[in-house]
Image (cartoon, grey):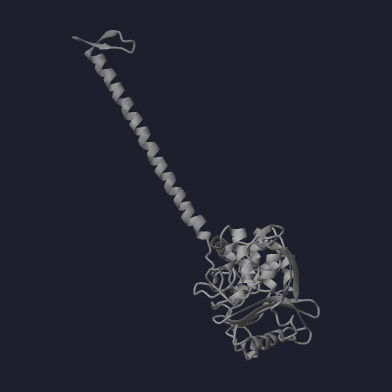
């Protein structure tokens, strides 16, 4: 049998029989085939792992997402105050500590001409009155409740703010604190002025200071609204001047106000009839001003019903929104209620109808 010459790994030439050489080549082919099989198996395992990961996400994790698009309902297993589960070891429902409503509540008790209105018992988490509380409406300066909430959550009230040209980017003739470009004052002063005097100029400076830009701050407002469940709300500015894409509901205002009341500084602001501020102009000259409340209960233009104490709130008025008011009131035992009206026909009728709402508070 003839031999076959080949070169081994050392570079030396060796002689093999044809049978030995065929056996060597067959072994090499088997090794190459085995390596291919291993690579194919690894690819298949990776594909299986990817498919399994997707299935776990889609059918397990993603299935738990709950988009808050429906109004709150006491019987809802997720958002309501009750649960169909009998086990004692269950998660607290989202709206477990919130007033909820299933449509209109106690609507026949009042002759309410305002478009939307609600009265909420905070201690008992009950909706006492509800008229169109889930209908989207222009909120005017009630918007500033959310502006205040974002400010308190993300801002440092001791920050010193220098007023920029952005202060002028508001509608001429709208309510202002009358701050000027170059003025130097604290974020706290801006917050008090925005709520008490309903200063749109203060709202713009707050937004720019905290958000870096007004647009970014408005995004923060919308994110916070979504976080607290105010799903029928969308903001386009921090002050509430009219825009077709700027809207909220009575119920969402209740959620914002309820959240803002967790901050002591907010409770202090809304309870004040006025606020005295000292700050400086661009040239260093001093400014001393007293911002007066726009709340008629604080200006002696309206009186609350007997046995009801008005603690404070936020007003709002534009041609599109009508006259609006969100109010914190208490009975003689100190039990708190939130009462909200959107789009009353006038400021006079607003307070007449607000007194109707407050008359439903039982002492």
User: Which image quarter: residue 227?
Assistant: bottom right
Q: Pick the quarter of the image with the C terminus.
A: bottom right
Expressed as whole percent of the image width and height from the top left, the position of residue 81 reads 64, 71
Q: Quick check: can you spot residue 155?
A: no
Q: Quadrant of residue 45?
A: top left
Question: In x, y percent, where is residue 68?
Answer: 54, 67
Report the number of numbered marks.
Answer: 0
Q: Position of residue 24 (x, y in %)?
A: 29, 18
Q: Nearer the viewer, residue 179 or 357?
A: 179
Q: Position of residue 283 (x, y in %)?
A: 68, 60
Q: Quadrant of residue 21?
A: top left
Q: Residue at x 32, y 27 (%)?
A: 32
On-image quarter of the N terminus: top left
Q: Residue at x 27, y 8 (%)?
A: 13
Q: Is residue 33 visible?
A: yes
Instruction: Looking at this view, name the residue that lies furthest to the bottom.
Output: 111
């Amino acid at each position: 049998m003839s031999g076959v010459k080949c070169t081994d790994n050392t570079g030396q030439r060796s002689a093999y029989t044809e049978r030995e050489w065929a056996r060597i080549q067959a072994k090499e082919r088997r090794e190459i085939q085995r390596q291919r099989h291993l690579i194919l198996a690894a690819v298949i395992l990776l594909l299986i792992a990817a498919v399994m990961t997707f299935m776990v996400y889609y059918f397990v994790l993603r299935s738990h997402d709950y988009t808050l698009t429906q109004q709150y309902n006491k019987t809802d297993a997720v958002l309501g105050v009750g649960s169909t589960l009998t086990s004692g070891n269950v998660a607290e429902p989202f709206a477990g500590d919130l007033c909820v409503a299933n449509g209109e509540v106690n609507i026949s008790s009042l002759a309410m001409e305002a478009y939307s209105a609600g009265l909420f018992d905070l201690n008992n988490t009950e909706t006492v009155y509800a008229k169109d509380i889930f209908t989207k409406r222009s909120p005017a300066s009630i918007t500033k409740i959310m502006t205040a909430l974002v400010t308190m959550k993300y801002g440092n009230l001791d920050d010193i703010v220098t007023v920029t040209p952005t202060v002028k980017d508001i509608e001429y003739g709208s309510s202002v604190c009358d701050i000027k470009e170059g003025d130097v004052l604290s974020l706290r002063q801006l917050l008090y002025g925005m709520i008490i005097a309903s200063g749109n100029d203060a709202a713009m400076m707050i937004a720019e200071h905290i958000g870096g830009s007004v647009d970014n701050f408005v995004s923060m407002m919308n994110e916070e609204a979504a976080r607290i469940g105010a799903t029928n709300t969308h903001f386009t500015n921090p002050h509430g001047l009219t825009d077709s894409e700027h809207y909220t509901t009575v119920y969402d205002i209740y959620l914002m106000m309820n959240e803002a009341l967790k901050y002591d500084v907010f409770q202090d602001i809304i309870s004040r009839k006025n606020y005295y501020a000292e700050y400086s102009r661009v040239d260093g000259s001093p400014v001393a001003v007293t911002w007066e409340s726009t709340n008629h209960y604080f200006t002696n233009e309206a009186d609350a019903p007997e046995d009801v104490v008005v603690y404070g709130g936020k007003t709002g008025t534009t041609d599109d929104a009508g006259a609006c008011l969100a109010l914190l009131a208490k009975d003689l035992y100190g039990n708190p209620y939130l009462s909200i009206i959107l789009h009353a026909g006038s400021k006079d009728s607003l307070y007449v109808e607000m007194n109707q709402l407050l008359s439903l508070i039982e002492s």
